[in-house]
Amino acid sequence: MTSTQRVGRPGFHHELFLHGSATELLEFLVPFVADGLAAQERTLLLVRPDTAEMVLNRVGPTPYLTLQPALPHPGRPAAHVQAAGPMLADYARVLHEEPAVPDSQWPEWRRLEAVLNLALRHHDTWAVCAYDRRTLSEEMVADLHATHPLIGHHPPPQHQHNDRYQDPVEFLTHTRDSPPDPIELSAPTVELVDPLPATARATVYWFARHAQLPTAEADNIVFATHEILANAIVHGRPPTVLRLWTQPNRITVTVTDTGPGPTDPTAGLLPPEAPNETGTGLWLSHQLVDITHRRHPHGNTIRLASPSHDLR
């Protein structure tokens, strides 16, 4: 499949392109854009300013091309999933110049790449995720191949089906367990066993304000703690243990129970099908704070942290 051939419609076409320089990116990007313009397909580029300037120098301004800034930091996966649907509805082609993702955020980022195949499957959009391979480890590259049905190559620009792609639900099932944050290896600031939700909310709010979190961030982690604790009480097994650590301008909370944790591997990343359905609080929490899941011999732990890593 060459760059002048369309990947097929209808459907969501999720492609990975790994590049090693600005020149490689541009030489892949320009034909991708030019082919879309020739077909009068609305194209969106989420790219850095220098990339945008180089593209405009090659193809010129056109009403079929929209340029917006790329994400400077990874952010929260569930928030990206929520925003992606409305954005893609307006465009036939999208390319995102992806941010460098720190090791600490990669476990949740790779889950984002997998869940997009489910969340956006009803869209008729060709979406290319362009990563600088120099920022990626071998494990990261393997995860990206597992989460993209198409692979872009250069030179010349080609778009090929990827035989390393994995079923998204299967991938999410095998990657749901994130490693502990290093702070979890230290003694917590506070530990509560089987706390009442009201006690947990008050405790987290007090420490969040003591850590000088902005009011909105403090409210977010209080809300998320309440939702995660309530889920553990209702769906998990006692005892339920809340641990909290404070750092300058950051709060980390874990909620552990002795149950197996959520059975749905997409829990928190996809919105429930109906409002007020079970899982709504978890989904909202994933958009408000950093959340990871971890099963272990003693049960299940959900970690919450605020503000986001990229705000520190």
Image: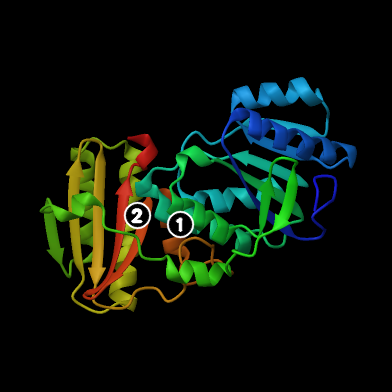
What residue sits 61% from the left and 57% below the top?
148
Q: Is residue 83 above or below residue 301?
A: above
Residue 70 quadrant? top right
Whole-Å distance between the Cαs marked 2 and 1?
9 Å
Return the x and y of residue 295 as percentages of the image width and height.
Answer: 31, 70
What residue sits 30% from the left and 77% below the top?
236
Q: In front here: 26 or 122? A: 26
| Count of picture labels | 2
Residue 49 in the figure: left or right of residue 40? left
Using a 10 Å C-alpha cutoff, classify the residue at mark 2 as few (fewer than 14 neighbours), some (14 to 19) or many (20 or more): some
Using a 10 Å C-alpha cutoff, classify the residue at mark 1 as few (fewer than 14 neighbours), some (14 to 19) or many (20 or more): many
- Where the C terminus falls, by quadrant? top left
Return the x and y of residue 263 as percentages of the image width and height.
Answer: 42, 76
What residue sits 53% from the left and 36% below the top?
71
Which residue in the rendered view is the most extreme toward the front? 155
Please name the amino acid that badge 1 sits on.
Leu
Residue at disc 1, secondary structure: helix
Q: Which mark is residue 77?
A: none
Q: Which residue is mark 1?
A: 284
Residue 65 in the figure: left or right of residue 286? right
Q: Can residue 74 be seen from the camera position used here?
A: no
Q: In front here: 157 or 72? A: 157
Q: Can residue 226 be seen from the camera position used here?
A: yes
Colour scheme employed for the rendering of this structure = rainbow
Return the x and y of residue 134 as percentages of the image width and height.
Answer: 48, 38
Q: Which residue is mark 2?
A: 223
Residue at disc 2, secondary structure: helix
Do the residues bearing badges 2 and 1 touch, measured as CB atoms within 8 Å?
A: yes
Please name the amino acid that badge 2 sits on.
Phe
Q: Is residue 79 above or below residue 67?
A: below
